[in-house]
Image (cartoon, helix red, strand yellow):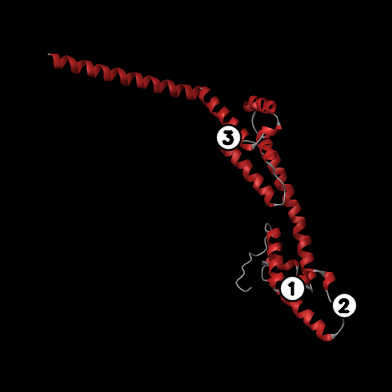
Amino acid sequence: MGGIKIDKLTETNFHEWRQRIKMVLTLRDLDDMLDEDGKPTDAETRELAVSKRRDTKASAIIGLTLGSEQLEHVSGCEATAEMWSTLQGVFQRKSLMNRMKARREFYTVEITIGERMLGYINRVRNLGENLKATGGEVTEMDLAMSVLNGRTSKYENVLVALVAKGENELSLDFVKSRLLQEERRQADKSPSTKRIGDMALVGAKYRGQRRQEEETGQGGRDCG
């Protein structure tokens, strides 16, 4: 296509593919072939022949960007407008289903057992990007609320504090900082963390005593 590269149509890229195909057909002065009402009404043979030729070119451009599975959808189409209408019907239905699936995953996400808070927040952010890619709208408030909805009861006090702040301050970065702070606080209070800290303290005291004994012993030998 004259050096212009367009990825083949797949289950997930219809919106981008449609935009790029329209651009290519516009460059070729063939974009009117997408409109069923744009066909010429003049019955003169020459004009019909020219119109048919342009329609064939437009169909070929679209066809070259379709995979084998997608070609099956348009195998019986006789004109570019019919091909275009068929593809839109198929993929807009699928796009709606994908959007519903992405929306459900985004608003029902929950932190899993053993998952660190930062990993969970990044997972919610990725689900939000997936929803945006299907044409859904995701605001900072939506991201923050989704993160909070999927937390465990261990973070209930964070939710209470955030509610008191009001919606204007409820951004993802603000929620993220509070949840990570609470995660660190809880980790510092956990028995395992305390045992590790106690062991480190005992080890430090022992090393300090040994060092003092060695210094004292060395000093005694020097005086002798």
Along the viewing direction, whichever of 150 and 35 lies nearer the viewer? 35
Counting from the top left corner in percent of width and height, residue 57 is at 72, 76
Residue tagged 3: 117
Residue tagged 2: 41
Q: Can residue 76 be seen in this view?
A: no
Q: Is residue 168 visible?
A: yes
Q: Distance between the residues labelled 3 and 1?
A: 52 Å
Residue furthest to the bottom: 45
Q: Is mark 1 on a helix, strand or loop?
A: loop
Residue 28 quadrant: bottom right
The correct choice, above or below, for 201 with respect to 85 in the image is above
In the rendered picture of this protein, how many numbered marks are placed on residues? 3
Residue tagged 1: 30
User: Do callouts 2 and 3 mark residues in contact (Cβ within 8 Å)?
Assistant: no
How crowded is the residue under tag 3: few (<14 C-alpha within 10 Å), some, or many (20+)? many
Counting from the top left corner in percent of width and height, residue 104 is at 72, 43
Q: What's the amino acid at mark 1?
A: Leu
Along the viewing direction, whichever of 35 and 70 lies nearer the viewer? 35
Q: Is mark 3 on a helix, strand or loop?
A: helix
Residue 183 quadrant: top right
Counting from the top left corner in percent of width and height, residue 219 is at 18, 16
User: Do callouts 1 and 2 mark residues in contact (Cβ within 8 Å)?
Assistant: no
Q: Distance between the residues labelled 1 and 2?
A: 17 Å
The correct choice, above or below, for 188 with respect to 28 in the image is above
